[in-house]
Image: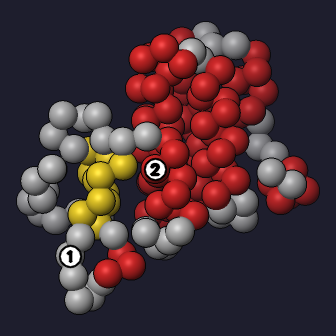
Amino acid sequence: MSSLPDPLRTIWLRDDAQAVCIIDQRFLPFQLKVEELDSVDSLCTAIRDMHLRGAPLIGVAAGYGMYLAALEARAGRGPEHLHEAARRLVATRPTAVNLAWAVRRQLAELAEATGLSVTVRAFVTPPSPLEMTSA
C-alpha cells in the first residue's frame, strides 16, 4: 500500500511508480480511502464510476492513465496498446474536455519522442464533437 503524500494530494504515483493512487471521493467526507490503480482498466473504472470527480482531476487522471498504458505497452502489449487505451479512456467520459485534451497531449508527446506509428499520430488530431460522442 502506498503511503500518503505530504502534503496530501488527490492523485499521486505509488512509491514504486507502478500504480496511481487516488483518494476515493465516494467516501468523503466521512472516510479517507486510498485506492491504488495499477492498470488502464482500473483507472477507466475509477473515472467512469466517479471514484474521482472534477474536470481538472479527471484530466490529470487521464494523463496518468496514459502513463499506465505506456507501462503496459512496454511490458509486452506493444505500442498499438496506447491507441486502444486512449480510446477507452476518452470513452469513460466522452464529453469531458480536460480528459480528451490530456489523452491527446500524452499521445502527441509519445509520438514525437518515439516516432510511434501513424495510427497513434492520427489519434492525436482533435476529434470532432460528433466523433467524441460516438465512442
Q: Amino acid at mark 1?
A: Leu
The residue sitting at 32% across, 81% down in the picture is 27
Name above or below for residue 96 compared with residue 25: above
Mark 2 or mark 1, earlier in chain: 1
Direction from residue 60 to residue 109 in the image, left or right: right
Specify few, some or many for label 1: CA neighbours under 10 Å numbering under 14, 14-19, or 20 or more: few
Residue under pointer 2 = 42
Residue 29 falls in which quadrant of the image?
Answer: bottom left
Q: CA distance from mark 2 to mark 1?
A: 19 Å
Residue 39 falls in which quadrant of the image?
Answer: top left
Residue 77, given in percent of the width and then of the height, sits at 54, 19
Q: Camera-side residue: 117 or 91?
A: 91
Q: Amino acid at mark 2?
A: Ser
Label pair 2/1, CB-CB below 8 angstroms: no
Residue 68 falls in which quadrant of the image?
Answer: top left
| Helix, strand or loop for disc 2 | helix
